[in-house]
Image (cartoon, rainbow, N blue to C red):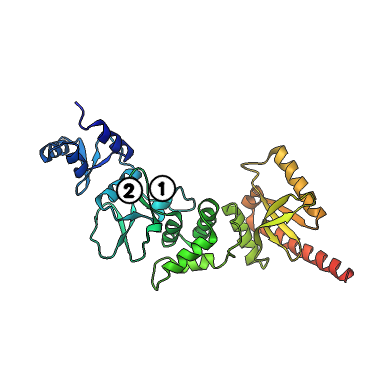
Amino acid sequence: MNLFSSSLAADIARSHGIVTVGRLLADGASTHVIRRHVTEGLLVRVHDGVYRLATSADTFEARCVAACLADPEIVITGVAAGRLWGFRHITRVTEPVALVAHARTPITSGIVLRRTNQLDESDAVRRDDGIRIASPPRAWFDCARDVDDERFESLTEWVLDHHTSMPTLWRLTTRMTARGRPGLARVHRVISQRATWQKPADSRLELRVLNGLERRGVGPLVRQYPIVLHDGTRIHADGADPSIRWALEVDHVTWHGGRYDAQRDKARDRGARRVGWQVDRVTDLELAHDFDAAIDDLVDLHALRRAEFDSHRQRNA
């Protein structure tokens, strides 16, 4: 005997095994039948009026659906939304983190609640499975209170690369500016370091190298700087000092490379040299073996390039 109609069964499957009392009643079940299903262990209470089908796994997504069905106005955000969006560089959570307006009295168990007076319609997206989730920019902003500066800077680069633009993050930050808002100082520290036109760094390793060089007085280098070769090809250096036409590339030989990629990189470097640029490379293996020594080498190469460039300019003055 089927417990539910085929349409409700499909809805429950789409909602990760979560169902409300309202949907059960609309499907023809009486309150007595619902209580019996709970008593017999067929339904597991998650929140008041919200149940999980016992045969369905208690997944993170199911918990988020249950929270949203218990209070349709809350929004899953921060690192919880980041997990749902597939953000990198965040801590992993098992409980939903939800935004709720100050005036509401929402559910209080199995969820981390955060109150806000700034929640626009553009801040939330409703998924097909019933989860009301913060948009990638809003989820990014709310992650700031839960990760350190280094992780948040890497997260910012990842979000820019996959979801949004720097002007969008600036507009959101301006709208969210309020004294005492958790994470706001970290947001300002990170995004104030970037020009709005800069492209994101390709990976966390590139970002560590650029920051390491900047701490040693090299830079700030321009990320993903475009260099136009003689044939019109445009390449983008991981970091560049345009004042002396010096570029840096970080090679990930542990996960890509091979003969074809090495040949292509050498051809690109020769092309850059023909238009007056010096390209120096460092590999992830070198950085893993002795990060500080690799940074020392790059600092020396940058200094030699500056001396060479200045000498050439004086000879031609």
Left or right: where does residue 238 sit relative to residue 26?
right
Q: In the image, residue 106 lies at what x, y percent?
A: 24, 57
Work out which quarter of the rendered image holds the N terminus and state it: top left
Camera-side residue of 177 and 155: 177
Q: Residue at x 80, y 58 (%)?
A: 276
**Which residue type carries mark 2?**
Cys
Q: Secondary structure at mark 2?
A: helix
Residue 139, compared with residue 28, is above or below; it is below
Q: Which residue is mark 2?
A: 64
Left/right placement of residue 169 relative to residue 101 reads: right
State the residue in front, 42 or 176.
Answer: 176
Q: Residue 145's spot in the image, x, y percent?
A: 41, 62
Q: Residue at x 15, y 36 (%)?
A: 29
Q: CA distance from mark 2 to mark 1?
A: 10 Å
Residue 151 is situated, as x and y percent measured from the top left of the image, at: 50, 57
Q: Mark 2 or mark 1: which comes first in sequence? A: 2
Identify residue for label 1: 84
For badge 1, the amino acid type reads: Leu
Q: Residue at x 53, y 53 (%)?
A: 158
Q: Split into 4 quadrants, where in the image is the C terminus?
A: bottom right
Q: Do the residues under discs 2 and 1 have CB atoms within 8 angstroms?
A: yes
